[in-house]
Amino acid sequence: MAATSTSEIKVVGKSGQISLGKRYAGKMLELQRLDDGTLLLRAVAMIPESQLWTLQEPDHSKIARGLAWAAETSPRESDPQSLLEPKRKRRSRPRGRRG
C-alpha cells in the first residue's frame, strides 16, 4: 500500500483549538513541537502499563526446553473424554518430622 500525503490549512480558534474532523474523534495524538516552530501531530496507540509484557521478547529458554521435550517425547494418543471428567483429589501423605 503506497503512502499518500495531503495538506490542509486549519485555523486555530479563539480557544486555541483546531478541528481535525470525525475521523480522529476519540483518538490519541502526539503533538511534537520542533525547534523551527513546526508542529507535528501524529496518531499514537497507548498501551496500559499492565499490558507492556506483551511487547517483550518471549522467554527463549522456555521455548527451547519445550522444543527439546517435543523432540525427545514420542507422541501418544490422548483421551479427550478424560478432560471432561472431574478431577479426583489426591490424598496427601503424612510428612515425617525433621529433627
Image (spheres, rainbow, N blue to C red):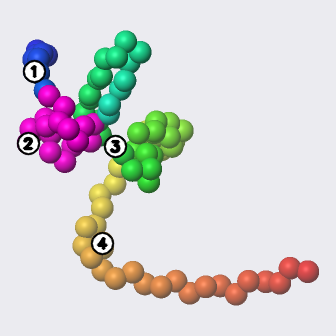
Q: Which residue is label 2 attached to?
A: 22
- Residue 83, numbered label: 4
Looking at this view, is 12 or 49 the one in front? 12
Looking at the image, residue 68 lies above or below residue 9 = below
Does residue 42 show up?
yes
Q: Amino acid at mark 4?
A: Leu
Q: Nearer the viewer, mark 1 or mark 4?
A: 1
The residue depicted at 30 percent of the width and 22 percent of the height is 39
Q: Which residue is label 1 attached to?
A: 8
Label 1, label 4: how far apart the Cα atoms are: 61 Å
- The prevailing secondary structure element of the residues shown in magenta is loop
The residue depicted at 25 percent of the width and 67 percent of the height is 80
Looking at this view, is 12 or 28 the one in front? 12
- The reply to whether callout 2 and callout 3 are in contact (CB within 8 Å) is no
Q: Mark 1 or 4 closer to N-term? A: 1
- The reply to whether callout 1 and callout 2 are in contact (CB within 8 Å) is no
| Residue at the extreme front | 14
| Residue at the extreme right | 99
